[in-house]
Image (cartoon, rainbow, N blue to C red):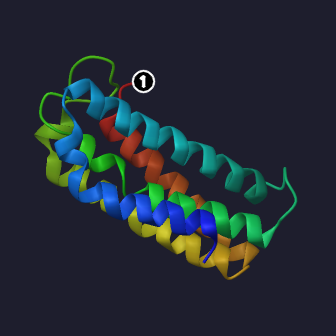
Amino acid sequence: MSLRLAVTAALVLVTLPVAHAQFAKPEDAVKYRQSAMFMMNHHAARLGAMAQGKVAWNAEVAGANAETLATLAKLPWQAFTAGTDRGDTRAKADVWSDNAKFTASAQKLQDETARLAAAAKAGDQAAMKSAFGEVGRTCKGCHDQFRKD
């Protein structure tokens, strides 16, 4: 396991149980989830560049980014708490009114990013491209349903 992954995993394990309690204000929760999404986008963009052939395939880099993306995909959901539907957010009311569907979408993203990480870590470029496409469709589906333009 790489040092970066070990540090990321340790941070996730430490922050998951207490993160909700750390949101003193709703805007803190909004910033937290926006930051997690920003980082997810950053790592997905690196993988997308490889999947599209814009950057040369590098199994090690793909594996590290996919693994980080899978870890990050676990973070933002705890920050969709009561009171975070107002202010600087693009979350639609459906996040809270149809929370079961939103939660299922969040789980699907976690499942798909785990598949992507497995494919990338195995060094299988074709499988990584396919899995990356599914992650993209999952992101788009959730954004279409639960994010304002």
Q: Position of residue 136 (x, y in %)?
A: 54, 53
Q: Is residue 108 above or below residue 27?
A: below
Asked whether residue 108 is in view, the answer is no
Can residue 28 be seen at all in this image of the molecule?
A: yes
Q: Which residue lies furthest to the top in this view?
A: 87
Left or right placement of residue 146 versus residue 62 in this view:
left
Residue at x-position 41% and y-position 47%: 141
In the rendered view, does 69 fall on the left or right side of 94? Answer: right
Report helix, strand or loop for mark 1.
Answer: loop
* Image spot of residue 10 (x, y percent): 43, 65
Query: Can you give x and y, in whole percent of width and height, for residue 83 in the image?
Result: 14, 28
Residue 54 versus residue 89: which sits nearer the camera?
89
| Residue 31 vertical placement versus 86 (above, below) | below
Q: Residue 105 placed where, x, y %? A: 31, 55
Examine the rendered structure and indicate whether residue 45 appears above or below residue 114. above
Q: Which of 139 and 64 is in front in this view?
A: 64
Left or right placement of residue 70 versus residue 147 in this view: right
Q: What residue type is labelled 1?
A: Asp
The quarter in which the N terminus is drawn is bottom right
Q: Quadrant of the rendered structure where residue 85 is?
A: top left
In the picture shown, does residue 44 fall above or below 5?
A: above
Q: Residue at x 46, y 55 (%)?
A: 72
Residue at image x 55%, y 60%?
A: 68
Residue furthest out toward the right:
56
Few, some or many residues within 10 Å of mark 1 (<14, 14–19, 20+)? few
Q: How many marks overall?
A: 1
Quarter of the image with the C terminus is top left
- Residue lying at 57% horizontally and 78% vertically, measured from the top left: 118
> Which residue is labeled 1 in the image?
149
Q: In this view, does 57 lie to the left or right of 42?
A: right
